[in-house]
Each structure stands twice: as C-alpha cells, then as structure tokens.
C-alpha cells in the first residue's frame, strides 16, 4: 500500500527540517511525500531544496490558507492512504507509517488514528500533555470526542467519494471533515494504540480571544452541518474532555 503524506507550510523555517527528517527516516519506504508551500518568503524553500530528492511532489504558490493547500495535496496524491503531517510536527518514531499500514491491512479499515503528544515548541523532549485516544462510538462524538487530526490516516477513495476539506468552516475544517466521515457517513475507523505524532503546542485556533471566538463559531457550524442534535453540549464536552490530556 502506498502512503501519500502531505505537509503544507508557509514561512516554516524554524521547524520544517525536523518535519521532513521524520518522514525520510521511516522504515516503510512506499511513501509519496507531497509538500505544498504557500509562497514562503523566509528560508523555508532553501531548506526544502536540500531534501528535493526525498520530495515526490512540490508546489510553491499562493493559496487560500492551510485547508486549500491540503486539498491541493490531496488532489495530487496517488497513494492508497493519505496522511497529514503539519510543518511544525514530527512523526514520533521511524516505524510509525509501518504500524499504520499494518493496521490498515489487518483490519481492512477505511481509516486509522492513534495517540499524540503535545510538546514544548523549544524543547521537543518536553511533553506538555498527551492525547490518548480510544475506539469510539457515535455517542462519543456527540459527547465531544474526536481523534487527534494529525494522527488520522484515511483511504484516498474516501476523499474522492465524500469530499475534501471544506473552506466554509475556518480553522474547524479538519473537525468538520472528521464529523462528516466518522459520524455522518460512519466509515470504518480503527484505533491504533500507538504514539503517532509529536505536535508542538500553539496553533491558529488558540492564538487569541478573537481566534478562540471564531473557533467556537466554526465548531458550532461544523456540528450543525453534520446534524448532531445538541451542538452546544457537544462543544462544551469537547472542551472539558481536553482536561484529562494533562493528567496522563
């Protein structure tokens, strides 16, 4: 099974090399690595140039944001499975993709997801909190559960059949896609109890009060769009559920 791994980046000179290195050291070799750059003006492009032999598809041009760039990568992908690796993040070990592919094969699943560590942006060895997931039910989603999006790997045919990331939900586009796939269409998603990604803390939706407000509105819209009955309860439960990530 070929895995198409997509990284989108814009002015990511600080961490992009760590990201790329975590891909090229994978023991599983049937990986198509796609990098979509939004027209970086820092040293991102010169860093990526050093690894051009490891990048199967590279595009650098203006886009409409992260999810537009992801859609470009998905449309270019030729793999059986698609995964996303953010430019600030790293695959947690060199056998991560091997374990994911094995899980797909053993379970004949549509999707595989796992665990994630939030790490200190300045010290990758310092774990801030842990997102330990589980095998879920529809009720779990209604009560605010969601997989860690950076750990979610999906069959390519799902995007062809169920659609890409919608640009109508702002920073909740990944949440909306997961609700659409997992809740509305009830694809066969399997939990792999393994650490998949080390993710640096921070992010678009948590940058300020204004960003948090817009994140709330976009979450609400995503939940309503996928016909979950009590969206405010789902949002509240989603926020509360994150508390236990600090207790692991």
Image (tube, helix red, strand yellow):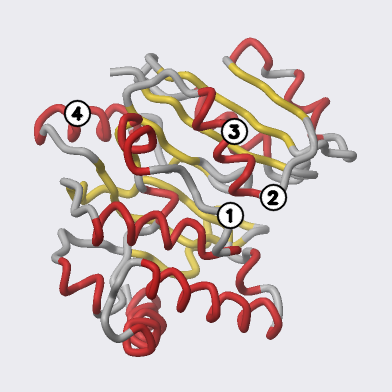
- Please report contact status of discs 1 and 3: CB closer than 8 Å, yes or no: no
Q: Residue at x 35, y 47 (%)?
A: 152
Residue corresponding to mark 4: 102
Q: Position of residue 65 (x, y in %)?
A: 69, 50
Describe the element under mark 1 as helix, strand or loop: loop
Mark toward the viewer: 4 or 1: 1
Residue 73 percent across, percent down from the top left:
56, 31
The answer to the question of whether label 2 and label 1 lie on touching residues, with beta carbons closer than 8 A, is: yes
Q: Which residue is mark 1?
A: 167
Residue placed at 76% from the left, 39% from the top? 38
Give the SS element for disc 3.
Answer: helix
Determine the secondary structure under disc 4.
Answer: helix
Residue that mark 2 sits on: 65
Q: Which residue is mark 3?
A: 72
Q: CA distance from mark 4 to mark 1?
A: 32 Å
In the image shown, does 32 or 132 lie closer to the viewer?
32
Location of residue 213 with respect to 104 vertically, above or below: below
Give the SS element for disc 2.
loop
Query: What crowding class fits label 1: few (fewer than 14 Cα within 10 Å), some (14-19), or many (20 or more)?
Result: some
Q: Is residue 6 above or below residue 209?
A: above
* Disc 1 from disc 3: Cα separation: 12 Å
Residue 132 falls in image quadrant: bottom left
Task: From the viewer's perspective, tell me whether residue 233 is left or right of residue 20.
Answer: left
Compute the Cα span from label 2 to label 1. Answer: 9 Å
Rendered residue at 16%/63% (across/down): 136
Dot 1 or dot 3: first in sequence order is 3
What residue is at 16 percent from the left and 74 percent from the top? 139
* Local crowd size for mark 3, using a 10 Å CA cut-off: few (<14), some (14–19), many (≥20): some
Q: Earlier in the sequence, mark 2 or mark 4?
A: 2
Mark in front: 2 vs 4: 2
């Amino acid at each position: 099974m070929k895995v198409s791994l997509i990284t989108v980046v814009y002015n990511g000179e600080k961490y992009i090399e760590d990201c790329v290195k975590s891909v090229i050291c994978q023991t599983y070799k049937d990986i198509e690595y796609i990098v979509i750059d939004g027209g970086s003006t820092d040293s991102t492009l010169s860093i990526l140039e050093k690894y051009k032999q490891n990048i199967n598809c590279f595009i650098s041009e203006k886009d409409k944001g992260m999810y537009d760039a992801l859609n470009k990568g998905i449309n270019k992908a030729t793999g059986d499975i698609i995964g996303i690796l953010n430019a600030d993040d790293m695959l947690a070990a060199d056998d991560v993709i091997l374990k994911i592919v094995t899980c797909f094969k053993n379970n004949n699943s549509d999707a595989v997801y796992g665990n994630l560590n939030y790490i200190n942006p300045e010290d990758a060895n310092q774990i801030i909190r842990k997102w330990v997931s589980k095998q879920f039910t529809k009720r779990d989603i209604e009560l605010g559960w969601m997989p860690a999006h950076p750990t979610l790997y999906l069959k390519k045919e799902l995007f062809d059949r169920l659609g890409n990331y919608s640009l109508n939900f702002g920073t909740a586009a990944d949440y909306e896609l997961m609700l659409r796939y997992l809740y509305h269409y009830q694809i066969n998603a399997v939990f792999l109890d393994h650490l998949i990604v080390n993710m640096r803390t921070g992010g678009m939706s948590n940058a300020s009060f204004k960003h948090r407000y817009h994140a709330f509105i976009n979450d609400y819209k995503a939940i309503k769009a996928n016909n979950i009955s009590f969206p405010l309860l789902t949002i509240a439960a989603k926020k509360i559920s994150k508390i236990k990530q600090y207790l692991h």
